[in-house]
Image (tube, rainbow, N blue to C red):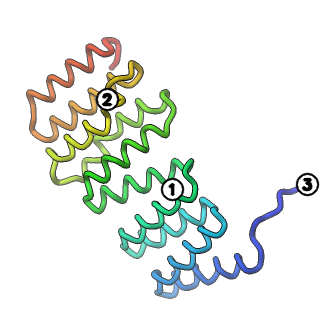
Amino acid sequence: MPKQSALDAVLFYQILLGELNTRQGSPGSGFSIMLDAARKTRDPALFQRAVDIALQARSGDAALQAAQTWKKEIPSAIEASRYVLQILLALNRIEEAGKALTVSIHELSLEQQSAAIASVPRLFGVVQDKTLASGVVEKALAQALTQSQTSASAWTTIGRMRRDAGQITAAVEASVKGHAADPKAP
């Protein structure tokens, strides 16, 4: 037997109204209506749509609000954490992005953490203040540095961040520590 949809007439109308407002040049109204529908249903797809509407309208603060609400309503939503991190970086709120990075990494299994950690320099590449970004990332990766499975990738990432900040001696130190943590790592 097919699963019963949570979409009733009222919710259908609300989603339709949100989409119509968005498409007819009122993205603020469309966003509000869609976020309200997402809150009522706790549907990840509706939260994501609310974030997307805000991003299309170039409203970073509204997108951040929707992503944070999504995370608050559905704490296990890993995708919401990723959105929060990316939006904070786009808004150049580096220190808050560091806290979001910590949350995002800790939500992953240990097997997934190394790959996520390796992608951090690319994520933070948009940041203008490379020295601040380097310090924030190092702080965010503090726990990863203490775990044998993630230590090498964390030190490598810290080394790349330090290099990007022009801290060459510190980057070499991090590279040496990364190699010492796992001599077989690439």
Label 1 sits on residue: 71
Foreground: disc 3 or disc 2: 2
Q: Amino acid at mark 2?
A: Ala
| Label 3 to label 2: alpha-carbon separation | 48 Å
Foreground: disc 1 or disc 3: 1
- Residue at 32% x, 41% y: name it: 120
Percent x, y for residue 82? 44, 50
Q: Amino acid at mark 3?
A: Met
Helix, strand or loop at disc 2? helix
Percent x, y for residue 58? 36, 73
- Label 1 with label 3: CB-CB less than 8 Å: no
Q: How many marks?
A: 3
Label 2 sits on residue: 154
- Lateral position of residue 121 relative to residue 16, left or right: left
| Mark 3 Cα shell of 10 Å, populated few (<14), some (14-19), many (≥20) | few
| Label 1 to label 2: alpha-carbon separation | 25 Å
- Residue at 32% x, 34% y: name it: 141
Label 3 sits on residue: 1
Helix, strand or loop at disc 3? loop
- Residue at 49% x, 27% y: name it: 111
Quadrant of the image containing the C terminus: top left
From what the image shows, is residue 56 above or below residue 94? below
